[in-house]
Amino acid sequence: MSTFLDDLLAGARRRVEAARAIESLEELRSRAGALDLPPSFLGALQQPGVSIIAEVKRASPSKGDLAPGIVAAVQAAAYRDGGAAAISVLTEPERFKGSLEDLADVAGSGTPALRKDFLVDAYQVWETRAAGASAVLLIVAGLDDAELASLLAEASEADLDALVEVHDEAELERAIAAGAGIIGVNARDLRSFEVDRDAFARLRPAIPEATIAIAESGIRGPDDVRAAAGRGADAVLVGESLVTAADPRAAVAALVEAGRTPATQRAGA
């Protein structure tokens, strides 16, 4: 039986085929390689406290429309002014209603931008670089070991960081074996869209200390940031609560302030 993730991966392959028919990989690589290097996504997450990755997300398969009329560049400016360390941009067009244009608009803000999509091909890595973004998302559940290794290598060649996403113990072991330097634990299983709110706390002890650990999904406000900090998060990725906030700058600022709580206090959170 086909899962949500299977459908999203199939859609990604169709998009790659269509894009490649317009511009070859060689042409895309040449165009992307002529651009200045993007700011470091990894560097932005290596600051003291818990870094906030704020997300531009128009819709989701589980909730439908969230902010269909959002202007990506305006939202990114609000996030930047609120103190976000980086900005994640959904570029999947069918279920999430995103685009590479959104990614390019956000990358133009100067804050490191993460392309959040369903990557299955090197072509998408170079699309990301050509948009001016700083990092790609690689979802372990959607890749075999060879594909994961290949896309990590391609991201490195493109001077992009890679956030490697897992949601259970087996996927975490694969991410570590592949040499992931940034690991995100998604509380949401993309095959079923069920949420396991204990996933980060359960997996964090097995993430190497030198690896950036990101808590994804289920972060709604400052209390959730403090809770993630107490469980050892280096960063949190926040989407729905920010795109639906009346004042996204203030909402990000509140999360940033919660993430600045001294580590000695966070340990008892």
Image (cartoon, helix red, strand yellow):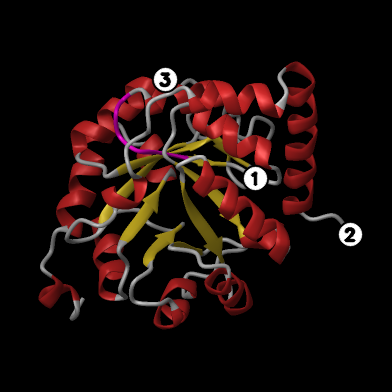
Q: Magenta region's main secondary structure? A: loop
Secondary structure found at label 1: loop
Task: Indicate the secondary structure of the residue bearing disc 3.
Answer: loop
Q: Which residues are magenta?
A: 109-114
Q: CA distance from mark 3 to mark 1?
A: 22 Å
Name the spot of residue 84 as percent of width and height, x first.
26, 42
9 in relation to 27, above or below: below
- Compared with 220, 110 (above or below) is above
Count residues near mark 3 (Cα–Cα under 10 Å), then give few for <14, some for 14-19, many for 20+.
some
Q: Which residue is found at the position 69% from the left and 29% from the top?
A: 25
Tell me the CA gap for discs 2 and 1.
19 Å
Q: Name the residue: 52% across, 73% down.
A: 176
- Horizontal side, residue 150 vs residue 253: left or right: right
Residue 142 placement (x, y as % from top left): 70, 57
Image location (x, y in percent) of residue 21: 80, 21
Between tags 2 and 1, which lies in front? Answer: 1
The relative height of residue 211 versus residue 43 in the rendered view (above or below) is: below
Is residue 192 visible to the viewer in this orientation of the structure? no
Residue lying at 20% horizontally and 56% vertically, measured from the top left: 47
| In this view, 21 is above or below 215 | above
Residue 71 badge: 3
Q: Report which quarter residue 65 is drawn in.
A: top right
Q: Which residue is mark 1?
A: 118
- Left or right of residue 224: residue 83: left
Q: Earlier in the sequence, mark 2 or mark 1?
A: 2
Q: Is residue 106 left or right of residue 130?
A: left
The three-letter code of the residue at mark 3 reads Val
Q: Which mark is residue 1?
A: 2
Crowding at mark 2 (Cα within 10 Å: few <14, some 14-19, many 20+): few
Mark 3 and 1 residues: CB-CB less than 8 Å, in contact? no
Q: Nearer the viewer, mark 3 or mark 1?
A: 1
